[in-house]
Image: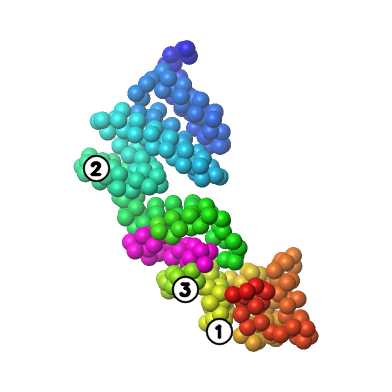
Amino acid sequence: MPRFISAEESVQYGREATAHASSGQFDDAEFWLRRIIGSWPGYAPGYADLGLLSFARAEAAVDPEGRERHRSEAEAWFRRAVAADPERRIPGVRVPLARTLALNGKERDALEVLDGLLSDPALPASVRADAETLATDLRDGKALFSRAAEMTGDLVLEPPSRPLAAAQRGALKQARALLRQAAERKGTFATLWLLGKVEMRSGDMEAALAALQRAHAIDPEQADGCRELGAAYLELDRAHDALPIARRAVELRPGDAGLHCNLALTLLLTGDVEGALAEATSALSLDPGDTITRGLLKLIDDVVAGRRQRPRSLAEAEGRGR
C-alpha cells in the first residue's frame, strides 16, 4: 500500500502532474494525480484534474477509438468530482463536464448541467461567462460540428471519385446528419462548408453545391469556400459558373499554387486555352514540384499541339467515365 501523503505533498504532486501534462507526458501526470486521490479519496479537485487529463488525452488521440475511450473516462471523472462537491465549492468543474457530455453525444444532459449551474445566483462571474458561452455554442450546433469533423477526419479531403469502404460511408452518413442538424440551428460558414465537403465525398453533387453556395453567401471572401464551390460546379459540368469563383479565389489568395491550377483547369474547360496555359505556368512557378500542375500543363500542351481534343468536362479531363 502506498503511504498516506500530507496536504502539502498533495499540492506538490499536483504541480508535478501539471508539469507532465503540459509536456504531453500523460501517464506520468496520471501517476501523480492518482497518488493524491489514493490518500484523499473523495477529493473533488483531484477527480476534476483527472477529468481534465483524460479530456486532454482525448484531444491528443489520433484514432477514434482512443478518443472515445478517453472522453468516456473524462466524463466519469467529472461526474465523480460533481458528486463529491454537493456544496459547489468548485462550480467550474461543471463546465468541462458539460463540454464532455456534448462531445459524447449527450447534448441534452450537457444543457441540463449548464442550466442548473447558471441558476445559481452566487456563481462566480468567470464561471458564469464560461457556462453561458458554452450553452450558446451548444445551442448553435458547435458540438455537432465538432463531432462531425472528428468522424470525417481527412476523408473529406480525398477526391470524390475515390471508392469508399462501408465504414467510411457510414461515417459520412452520420456526419451529414449531424451537420444538417447544426445548419438548421445556425448556418455558419464552417458548418455549411464541411457539409458541402461531406456531400461531395458522398457523391451527392447537387446537395454539395447547395451547401457550398450557402457557405459562400455567408462569407464570399473565404478562398477555401471559393475553391470548393468551384470544384462542385466543375463536378456538375458547369465550368462557366465555376470561372468567376475560381478567379475570385486567386484574387483572395494570389500566392496559392493550387488555386492558380484550379483556375487554369477551369479556363481550359471553358475554351480559353491561352489563359489556361498562363495560369498553369504561374501555378508551377509557385510550386515547381506539384505533380497535378505538371499533369495539367502536359494536358494543355497536348491540346495546343493537336495531340488531343480540348476536354469539355472535368471527368473528360481526368480520363474517367461519368
In the rendered view, how is the structure colored?
A: rainbow
User: In 3D space, how far apart are the residues under numbered discs 3 and 1 (Cα atoms)?
Assistant: 16 Å
- In this view, 165 is above or below 208: above
Viewer-nearest residue: 191 or 152? 152
Which one is in front in this view, the residue at disc 2 or the one at disc 1? 1
Viewer-nearest residue: 177 or 215? 177
Q: Is residue 191 magenta?
A: yes
Residue 116 marker = 2
For label 2, the SS is: helix
Q: Is residue 321 magenta?
A: no
Three-letter amino acid code at the position of disc 3: Glu
Three-letter amino acid code at the position of disc 1: His
Three-letter amino acid code at the position of disc 2: Gly
Q: Percent from the top left, x then y, of residue 278? A: 70, 81
The boundaries of the magenta stretch are 179-203
The mark nearer the N terminus, 2 or 3, is 2
Which one is in front in this view, the residue at disc 3 or the one at disc 1? 3
Q: Percent from the top left, x then y, of residue 54? A: 46, 36
- In this view, 288 is above or below 241: above
